[in-house]
Image (cartoon, rainbow, N blue to C red):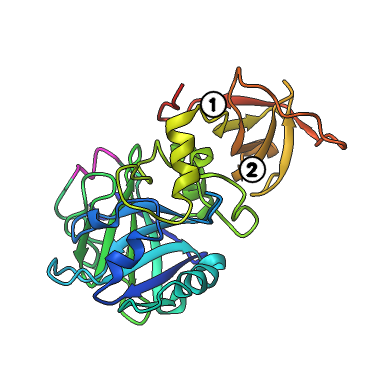
Amino acid sequence: MPNALEVIGLEDLGIVRVRGVDAVRFLQGQLSNDVARLGAGDSILAGYHNPQGRTIALLRLVQWDADPATPGDILAVVPRELAGVVASRLAKFVLRAKVKVADESAAWRVTGIVDVEPAAVARGAQGTGGADGTGPRELPSSVSAQAHSDGAVFVRVGDEPARWLVISPADAPDPMSGYAVGDRQTWLRLDIAAGQPQVYAATSEEFVAQMLNLDVLNAIAFDKGCYTGQEVIARAHYRGRVKRRMQRFVSRDACHLSPGDSGQLAGGRTFKVVLATQLAGGRCEFLAVAPLVGAAHDEAATTPPATTVADQVSLPYSLPD
């Protein structure tokens, strides 16, 4: 079914590579998720936080070496603008661990693929190669599953429509050549519709993990050992309701919003943008951290932010009460 998949270049995403026999143990002490769950068939989403529990970056971890006996070659997908920062900060904690951390963004190609004809690409379908015979013969069928094929790793990152990340060496043939090419904004709109956050330089260290719904998105393991920021994140989980969380909105009028922008909704709730995209007519759809409905509003700032008239749109998952 050569026309069922659409390829989207994700050149703004980079790769931090963590290699060595202690790679899993090292990352276990740095990230919010249980890195021991990472395997040849499973990727994980994890947060990298500062001691105050605020998210420095979100990392999609994949095991590059498909041999489960050698799990010490891990690729972390992050925004390219943060890859150097993440690699540098992680490297400071290596100490005596047998591990190397490096920003290898220039050495890798990150691509997104979208099932634009859901009926044509069944879960786990065979024969989805491109028009020139390249591309995967089988794609992971469940979210977070990964598979190695054609010198690349394929990671399922979404449903409705199904989406995958493809990671391959930049100097190797592109495993996704021969497919229709899509627009980067399409991927962004799908991230927003799925309620999948991202952290950029403008929002790094702005949000505590639960504000980005990382607990709902299975990016936090509350039963693992210590990691940077754990005390704050665990306290928010066990001792009280998180009053500010990421929610989805669509503006009623034309506006332009970018990650890190602040504003105030018509009802008085203040917000900070996580992701945003333009819609037809100039309206904006966005994910933003704001007080939950019914929670106490922020105290008025000395200079109130501009008011954005927007309607709240449901997420495909439920937020804790």
Could you tell me which residue is drawn at 43 percent across and 77 percent down? 102
Q: Is residue 100 above or below residue 51?
A: below
Q: Nearer the viewer, residue 184 or 301?
A: 301
Give the x, y percent position of residue 127: 16, 55
The outermost residue toward the top is 294
Up-down relation of residue 178 to residue 57 (above or below): below
Looking at the picture, which amino acid does disc 2 mark? Val
Of 19 and 186, nearer the camera is: 19
How many numbered markers are drawn? 2
At horizontal 60% and vertical 17% (from top left) the residue drawn is: 294
Q: Nearer the viewer, residue 281 or 310?
A: 310
Per the model, the C-alpha gap separating discs 1 and 2 is 15 Å
What residue is shown at x 43% (from left), y 40% (from top)? 234
* Residue 170 picture quarter: bottom left
Q: Quadrant of residue 135?
A: bottom left
Determine which quarter of the picture holds residue 75: bottom left
Q: Is residue 94 left or right of residue 280?
A: left
In the rendering, at what x and y percent does residue 152 appear?
Answer: 26, 69
The crowd level at tag 1 (other Cα within 10 Å; few <14, some 14-19, many 20+) is some
**Residue type, label 1:** Val
Callout 2 crowding tier (Cα within 10 Å): few <14, some 14–19, many ≥20: many
Place of residue 158 in the rendered image (x, y in percent of width and height, measured from the top left): 35, 44
Of the numbered discs 1 and 2, the one sitting upstream in the chain is 2
Whether the magenta-drawn stretch holds residue 288 is answered as no
- As helix, strand or loop, the secondary structure at mark 1 comes to strand
- Magenta residues (range): 118-123
Q: Is residue 120 part of the magenta span, yes or no?
A: yes
Residue marked by disc 2? 273
Residue at the spot of label 1: 313
Residue 157 is left or right of residue 199, and the answer is left
Is residue 61 shown above or below 281?
Answer: below
Secondary structure of the residue carrying numbered label 2: strand
